[in-house]
Amino acid sequence: MRPSGRAADALRSLSIEPGFSHHAEGSVLIRAGRTEVLCTASVEPRVPGFLRGQGLGWITAEYGMLPRATHKRGDREAARGKQSGRTQEIQRLIGRSLRAVTDRRAMGEIAVVLDCDVLNADGGTRCAAITGAWVALRLAFATLVRNRVLPTVPLTGQVAEVSCGLTEAGAVLDLDYAEDSAAAADANFVLTDTGGIVEIQAAAEQAPFTGDQFAALLALARTGVGALFEAQRRALEQAR
């Protein structure tokens, strides 16, 4: 049995609340079990210097955890004067994932910054960040279309991330912290709604795992992201 009592292929309870931030061009509060992440999309009228004059837009992300998002207080990275390697890795992953489903030429030379702030962490924070950030980005693009800045929404599809792992219960979907900390192997899958793979991060924590075990994890991930894509679409309908 899993600690949560869920079936092997069951996601945690999931909700995506659009319009949580009153001032951002797009925002959602995403809840996956006890993990909660606020994702806001802010539009900037210019791109970084390395892109100027190329007619391409830019999407980037910042990620952070509130001091008491976990069971004990963590220092603010701003107070330490530098970001951890983990934070930088997740920020880059979010940006890559969103750019993978965006027509940057159709954006023109504007930028969108996705801020993903973890309010409560119980595993899967980067998964919730990417899944929620896509909805926030879609809402921001819709705002630009309404304001006649863009003629159409420059997205080519949906993207979401889900975790899977090998535990005492076998291959399971959507690890919470208790499972993630004890898993024999864990993997994060960033997938698109057309079946494409953006990124896979997988590691054995104990003995190496087999190709068949990896295939089982990938199959679970495809099932999970299908439900995430549906939740994203429901959030957009709610926003309308």
Image: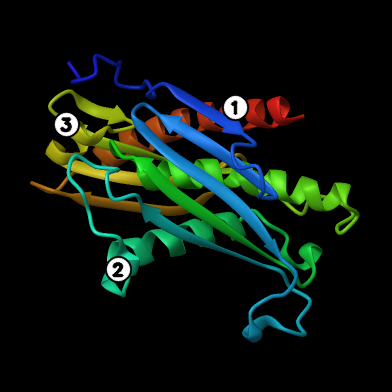
Q: Residues within 10 Å of mark 3 (few under 14, many from 20)?
A: some
Q: Is residue 161 visible?
A: no
Residue placed most toward the observer, 61 or 225 = 61
How far from the left and from the top, in percent, is residue 26? 66, 46
Quarter of the view holding residue 135? top right
Q: For marks 1 and 2, give the CA distance.
A: 39 Å
Residue 197 in the image: above or below residue 2: below
Q: In which quarter of the image is residue 5?
A: top left
Residue 228 x/y as whole percent: 52, 31
Give the quadrant of the C terminus: top right
Q: How far apart are marks 3 and 1 (CA)?
A: 27 Å
Indicate which disc, 3 or 1, sits on the residue closer to the N terminus: 3
Disc with the residue nearer the chain's start (2 vs 3)? 2
Instruction: Tell me the mark number nearer the camera, choosing from 3 and 1.
Output: 1
* Amino acid beneath label 3: Thr
Relative vertical location of residue 116 with respect to residue 224 in this rendering, above or below: below
Q: Give the Cα distance between marks 2 and 3.
A: 37 Å
Q: Which residue lies under the disc numbered 2?
A: 79
The residue that appears at 72% across and 65% down in the rendered structure is 104
Residue drawn where x is 46% and y is 46% of the image: 129
Q: Neighbour class for label 2 at 10 Å: few (<14), some, many (≥20)?
A: few
Give the foreground label among 2 and 3.
2
Q: Position of 181 compared to 47: left or right?
A: left
Mark seen at residue 167? 3
